[in-house]
Image (cartoon, rainbow, N blue to C red):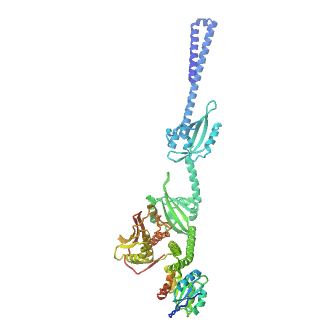
Amino acid sequence: MSGTMSDNLIPPLKVLHVEDDEDTREIAAIALGLSNEVELLQCASGEEALSKAPDFGPDVILLDVMMPNMSGPEVLKRLKDNPELARVPVIFMTARAQPSEIESLISIGANSVIVKPFEPMELLSKIISGMECPL
Amino acid sequence: MNNDCTLNGRTILVVGGLCWGFALAHVESIADSTLFGLVAFSASTVFLIMYGRRLWLSESTAREIERRNQELESVRQAVEQHCLISMVDANRRFIYVNDSFLAATGYSREELLGQDPIEFQNDTRPGLPGEIQEYLTAGKHWTGEIKIRCKDGSSLWTHTTIYPRVDRSGKFLGSISIRTDISATKLAVAEREAMSILTKLHDNVYIFEPETYRFTFMNESAMRRHGWDRDTYLNKTVVDTDPNFDRNRFGYFVAPLLDGSAEEVFTKAHLADGPHEISVQLIRPESGAISFVAVFRNVSEKIEVERIKDEFISTVSHELRSPTTSIKGALGLLLSGAVAEIPPKAKNLVEIAHRNADRLVLLVNDILDLEKITAGRMEFDLQTSDLHELIVEAIEVNKEFGNRFDVGFRFDGLEEPAHATFDSLRMMQVLTNLLSNAAKFSKPGGEVVVSLHQESENYRIDVRDFGAGIAEEDLSKIFERFSQANNHTERSGKGTGLGLSIVKAIMKKHNGTVCVESKLGIGSTFSLGLPMAAAPSTESTQVA
């Protein structure tokens, strides 16, 4: 939906952000857009993400848990079923962050969980640490 | 009347005697049958007969009168004994009260005489004195119920008849009231009505003897539960209601009632028709034996309503998270200056908005936490760990918050491992809450002392500040939801009012305690108690 291309020689981090709430998407876009090291693609639904992800070739996928039609865990399952995308780290973003809820997201294949509400200025560092240190 | 009779009798006797004497003096003339002699003899005889008759009549009348007087006296004594009698003058002031009136009401004669009876009545309808007065001045009596206020403040129900008192000319002199004490009847009627309500009550009501547990009363719904009628339950005991009834356990349950340390004890039970709340009381009637009264209330509906309410709160709170995420995120970005420079005045406003967005997030989180604890859905990962280590970490984590208020945290106490079983994250939440509160309410440049001690089988953590303190009347309620001591300042800000109830709930889940001691102007000490763990263990237990 919106994207920021890096001018650096180091390839930018390609982030696919799937979130049904427009305002949350906007804030994440601004926060991540402050960095030249991120190339961002945002999708408003799981279906849109599944259709665009293969072409975009993300380095990491930020996935909202509660979305209409197709939930985050359902999207993750489909991603894992796709050999092209199965190895891409997935980070869930959720307000429901009890230990068992986090554990259950990890058990279905997520790398990490970012708890909402998140600090926009810390979002990028959390994405990077979430990719590097899977729980 | 008796005297009159006697005088007339004497007159007759004197006149008769004179005539008789005169006749004897002229006995010869009588013998000669002179007219005078005959007249004198006849007159004297008539006089004597009349006297004799009069004498006989007066004696019988006197006897009759005496008999009637005795009867009247008996009636008077009976009425005096049974009735409360009083008289008032034309100005409605007591001029007479009988002993029964005094005995029943507890007043002395001096306290009543000269007073208006209305002053000694309870709940008298405003228009009633006027109505009674109208009856009396019309020469009619009034009968009805009047409630007299006794000297000890209690009420005495009386059935009262008031008669007017008038003189021969018909002038109104006042009235006489004759009352019967009907309090016992009233009480019996009220008790019968209460009993009929009890009988129809939806809750199951049981009354039984403390020693034998034998039932003396069951209301209809209780009888239905067991399929018993009155004759059946009178031969049953509490033991017959449940094959698993444990007499010792029940004895322990009701012990506080018997030793007087509690007026009512409660428990919960899952019966075939749903969850029930059970309350038991010991009643000590003025007359009759003491009994247990047990009331079983089905709380299925109440629990369902609670569930719906909790679900609603949970849904609303979760729904609030999305907008607060956006608000907080947007304001955070603005404040970072990364998007654009904001003029100082506008920045101030954004800071206010950001601060309050933080508060809103905290509030939503606290509501959800509390709701989770209440519903038993908050997870606790209990592990045996070192409390000392946790406290040191908590101090480190909250250092920056303390700096914001120019308040330092100092540890004072056991410098060795102190093992207890707890959920590190939740205990950190508890300590953070207490430390941040202590910092907020301390004076700038102040210090908060955290100590750790061993007390018999427990570890005790004290978080002590030297700040504003909490008023005594607030101390008892600060652990209640949405309750805040009335001591927040501009410096401390206003919290959510939920933090300490969460602390209390978390401690309870750890079989721990939290309490507070405080003095206004001197400071507060919040103390946590946690049972010691025998030895460190790596096993973890999940409790909900």
Instruction: Estimate the x, y position of residue B172 in percent, counting from the top left.
Output: 62, 34
Above or below — where is B180 with respect to B239? above
Q: At x 56% / y 30%, what residue is drawn?
A: B67
Tell me which corner region of the image, top left, top right, bottom left or bottom right, holds residue B401.
bottom left
Q: Classify B424 as above or below B12.
A: below
Residue B387: where, in percent of width, then height? 39, 76
Hey, which residue is sitting farthest right in the picture? B138
Q: In the rendered view of the protein, which quadrant contains the N terminus of chain B? A: top right
Q: Is residue B388 above or below residue B107?
A: below
Q: Is residue B197 left or right of residue B544?
A: right
Viewer-closest of B247 and B490: B490
Location of residue B59 with respect to B505 vertically, above or below: above
Residue A43: x %, y % from top left: 59, 86
Q: Nearer the viewer, residue B353 or B376?
A: B353
**Does residue A2 appear in this view?**
yes
Q: Which x, y percent locates residue A120?
A: 52, 81
Q: Residue at x 57, y 37 (%)?
A: B88
Residue B517 location, quadrant: bottom left
> Horizontal placement of B41 versus B436: left or right?
right
